[in-house]
């Protein structure tokens, strides 16, 4: 196994220096705010994702959690990619990430859509780790739904 | 190295029981394979052990030559299969020194064995004429410990819910030992059963049970020991252990999956109501009611895992051939070696006893802040197979303030070179996440 395909420099960088970590209150008091807490029962990883939105734009996607490098880096990338986006665009990114992770390494990611998320392409080849990468994204989906925005496709894996 | 001369006539260091590890390894076909381009370094025997050719051959031979259902045929194959199945029961009874072969109940695994006892309590609690030792209600207490595998927690939680009994538990000390300081307050006249792990699957601790047994006898409760991690690794004698029930599982002791054992004192098994109903466990059946077979058949409803039981018989023959005292000693030496070797890894914290006394060859640890999943992944890339996660013992992880641990566990085929490979892999892990 090429360990480097799993632990890309980008992933380790997000793990060691997470972006936007910490749960935040909404800047705009009129925003809908909701969060979801997800755990991976096999390893005990946990993440809480909080969404603040006016129903059209995701003003903030904040998070906190503890777990392995893959799950925590994934949360950092999620924040980076979805914060400030309008809901439709955010769910397109969500769909692309889920598709990448469900692709068993056969999906070529689009960097224009996924940004640093492309670094997770290698993770898709390790079935035991796909859930780690998806953990914050599934929590985001629930948090967004609770905040009253959109529904994205189910994970097919 | 200093050496101390032991006076003649006393046991000498050279007298310890030993076996040829290289020859043992040659019996295990899987140990030849590579993982990710490296020789397999299997340090996950507490999870499941590998199987020697002697066991695999018996499994194959049973299906190839003697396959038939047991206990219900007069034909030749049925007789052969029954003899093989009951022969395996006798071997296992001998292996743990059970006073009677009828005290060995075959189950699917340790989990099922514990559930059989828990549900026997449950069923007895519904019947006024049941043996009072098995009747539970509000005010009665069940005692376990914080060190248990989930399989020795959840069945008792469920039993307490069904009967209104109260569940209590021994805490665990910072050193990873059972905290017996509250023994007399914890085990009282209200206690009906104490169910404890003999050797912890996560901390490696070997629990000294004699004080607890003495207290259990004083208050008239019953004692179940979860021996899943002790029967495979050390000589176990149920008479010597003086428990009322022990449970263990075949796949951790060179046997196949799908076969486990409940050993119980004959008179207790005889006093227990059945749990699963069906074929084989009956004495006579009418449309109105059924009377039940004597143990062990009473607790073996339906066609049992016949080939698996026979192969487990082969496994205990194999282990006895190597010698359980020698296996125990081998693992003690490996554990001492590993504790010393792991102490050289910067930032490594061991959970559980850090001395090779009163502990088995299962060592859980944290490597700095690196998450166990990441440790396990880097080690896997080097062919080293360890378990990561909560090890089905979440309360132990919570006790030590971590969500997960990395665990290396040894068996008769483990070598010091494999422990060296683990330590080298941990150094590599540190570099990746530094």
Image (cartoon, coloured by chain):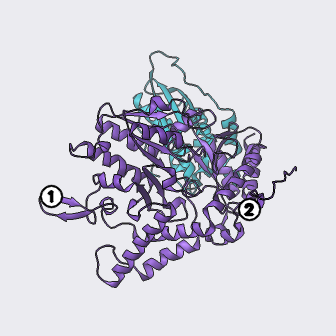
With B279 as the anchor, is B36 left or right in this view?
right
Q: Tell me whether marks 2 and 1 sit on the same chain.
A: yes
Residue drawn at (42%, 56%), measured in percent from left and top? B263
Residue at 51% x, 51% y: name it.
B241
Q: In the current view of this chain or complex, which residue is farthest to the right?
A: B1
Report crowding for label 1: few under 14, some 14 to 19, many 20 or more residues within 10 A (C-alpha).
few
Which is more N-terminal, label 1 or label 2? 2
- Identified at 38% across, 33% down, the residue is B189
Q: How many marks?
A: 2
Mark 2–mark 1 contact, CB under 8 Å?
no
The residue that disc 2 covers is B15
Q: Between residues B341 and A16, which one lies in front from this camera angle?
A: B341
Residue B32, visible in the rendered structure: no
Residue placed under numbered mark 1 in the picture: B289
Locate the N terminus of chain A by quadrant: bottom right
Give the letter of the purple chain.
B
> In x, y percent, where is residue B331?
67, 56
Can you name the residue that lies furthest to the front here? Answer: B9
Q: Which mark is residue B279?
A: none
Residue B195 pos. (x, y %): 44, 43
For the residues labelled 2 and 1, the Cα–Cα distance comes to: 60 Å
Q: Is residue B21 left or right of residue B128?
A: right
- The chain letter corresponding to cyan is A
Residue B40, given in percent of the width and then of the height, sits at: 67, 62
Q: Chain of mark 1?
A: B
Chain under numbered label 2: B
């Amino acid at each position: 196994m090429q360990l480097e395909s799993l632990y890309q420099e980008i992933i380790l960088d997000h793990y060691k220096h997470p972006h936007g970590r910490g749960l935040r209150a909404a800047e705009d008091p009129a925003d809908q705010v909701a969060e979801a807490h997800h755990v991976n029962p096999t390893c005990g990883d946990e993440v809480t994702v909080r969404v603040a939105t006016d129903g059209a734009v995701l003003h903030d996607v904040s998070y906190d959690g503890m777990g392995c490098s893959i799950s925590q880096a994934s949360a950092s990338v999620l924040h980076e990619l979805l914060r400030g986006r309008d809901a439709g665009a955010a769910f397109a990114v969500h769909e692309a990430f889920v598709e990448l992770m469900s692709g068993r390494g056969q999906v070529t990611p689009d960097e224009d859509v996924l940004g640093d998320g492309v670094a997770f392409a290698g993770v898709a080849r390790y079935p035991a780790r796909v859930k780690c990468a998806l953990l914050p994204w599934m929590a985001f989906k629930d948090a967004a739904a609770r905040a009253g925005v959109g529904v994205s496709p189910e994970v097919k894996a | 190295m200093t050496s101390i001369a032991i006076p003649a006539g006393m046991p000498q260091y050279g007298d310890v029981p030993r076996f040829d590890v290289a020859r043992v390894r040659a019996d295990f076909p899987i140990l030849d394979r590579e993982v990710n381009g490296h020789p397999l370094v299997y340090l996950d025997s507490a999870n499941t052990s590998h199987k020697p050719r002697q066991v695999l051959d018996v499994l194959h031979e049973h299906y190839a030559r003697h396959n038939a259902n047991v206990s219900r045929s007069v034909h030749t194959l049925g007789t052969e299969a029954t003899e093989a199945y009951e022969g395996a029961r006798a071997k296992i009874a001998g292996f743990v020194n059970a006073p009677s072969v009828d005290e060995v109940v075959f189950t699917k695994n340790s989990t099922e064995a514990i559930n059989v006892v828990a549900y026997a309590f449950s069923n007895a609690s519904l019947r006024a004429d049941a043996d009072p030792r098995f009747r539970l209600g509000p005010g009665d207490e069940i005692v376990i410990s914080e060190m248990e595998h989930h399989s020795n927690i959840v069945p008792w939680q469920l039993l307490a819910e069904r009967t209104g009994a109260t569940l209590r538990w021994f805490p665990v000390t910072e050193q990873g030992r059972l905290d017996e300081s509250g023994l007399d307050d914890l085990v009282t006249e209200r206690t009906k059963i104490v169910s404890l792990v003999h050797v912890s699957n996560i901390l490696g601790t070997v629990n000294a049970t004699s004080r607890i047994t003495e207290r259990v006898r004083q208050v008239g409760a019953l004692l179940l020991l979860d021996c899943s991690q002790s029967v495979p690794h050390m000589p176990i004698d149920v008479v010597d252990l003086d428990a009322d029930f022990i449970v263990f599982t075949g796949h951790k002791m060179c046997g196949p999956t799908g076969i486990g054992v409940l050993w119980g004192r004959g008179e207790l098994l005889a006093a227990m109501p059945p749990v699963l109903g069906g074929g084989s466990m009956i004495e006579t059946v009418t449309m109105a009611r059924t009377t039940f077979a004597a143990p062990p058949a009473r607790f073996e409803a339906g066609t049992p895992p016949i080939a698996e039981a026979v192969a487990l018989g082969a496994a205990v023959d194999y282990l006895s051939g190597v010698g359980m005292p020698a296996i125990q000693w081998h693992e003690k030496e490996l554990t001492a070696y590993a504790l010393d070797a792991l102490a050289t890894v910067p930032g490594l914290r061991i959970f559980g006893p850090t001395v090779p006394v009163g502990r088995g060859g299962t060592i859980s640890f944290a490597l700095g802040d690196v998450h166990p999943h990441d440790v396990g992944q880097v080690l896997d890339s080097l062919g080293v197979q360890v378990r990561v996660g909560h090890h089905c013992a979440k309360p132990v992880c919570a006790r030590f303030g971590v969500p997960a641990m990395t665990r290396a566990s040894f068996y008769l085929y483990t070598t010091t070179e494999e422990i060296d490979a683990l330590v080298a892999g941990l150094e590599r892990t540190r570099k990746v996440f530094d």
